[in-house]
Image (tube, rainbow, N blue to C red):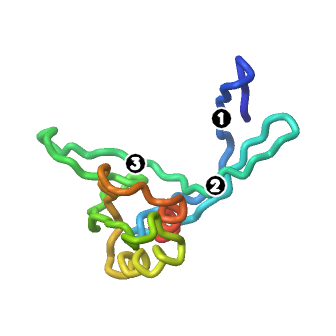
Amino acid sequence: MLSSDDGRTFTGRLEGLDVAPWWPATHGDQPLYPVTAEAGDITIDLARTGFRRIAVDRGPDGRGFGLVVNGVPVFCRGACWTNADIVRLPGTRDDYAPLLRMAAAAGMNMIRVGGTMLYESPAFFALCDELG
């Protein structure tokens, strides 16, 4: 449900979702659901998304850093990403797919994209969502 107080800014609420949780590749499946926005008689397809709960575990001394996904501690294993093709920036889904599939096959469940690097295309992030 979307509402607007000023006719330009919308807020929304999700209610009554019956969805399976999204998991990192090492812990389960990655169900993705279509998300649309409806305003009056206009419907906009936004994307596909997974639903998960994530928290930080600081450990008994409060100084640690661990990720908890859907209530389960997850050991993060992955790599730092550099772009798929330095000549053609950014890459396409076909450029990313074999590389990200190899990362998943190697047991990685996290890819770090440095803040000073190239911003990848939405296709990169969609594949990451799909592969966990």
Foreground residue, 32 or 17?
A: 32
Q: Earlier in the sequence, mark 1 or mark 3?
A: 1
Give amino acid for label 1.
Arg
CB contact under 8 Å: marks 2 and 3: no
Which residue position is annotated with label 3? 54
Most extreme residue toward the front, as rendered?
A: 87
Considering the numbered disc 2 on the image, is that residue within a helix, a strand or a loop? strand
Considering the numbered disc 1 on the image, is that residue within a helix, a strand or a loop? loop
Q: Residues within 10 Å of mark 2 (few under 14, many from 20)?
A: few
Foreground residue, 33 or 43?
A: 43
Which residue position is annotated with label 2? 47
Q: Is residue 130 above or below residue 97?
A: above
- Gap in Å between the C-alphas at discs 2 and 1? 16 Å
- The structure residue drawn at horizontal position 30% and vertical position 57%, both measured from the top left corner, is 73
Give amino acid for label 2.
Ala
Where on the picture, by quarter, is residue 38? Answer: top right
- Gap in Å between the C-alphas at discs 1 and 3? 19 Å
- The structure residue drawn at horizontal position 40% and vertical position 48%, both measured from the top left corner, is 54
The residue mark sitting in front, 2 or 3, is 2
Q: Is residue 87 above or below residue 3?
A: below
The N terminus: image quadrant: top right
Give amino acid for label 3.
Ile
Which residue position is annotated with label 1? 13
How many labels sit on residues?
Answer: 3
List x then y, in percent, for residue 13: 65, 35
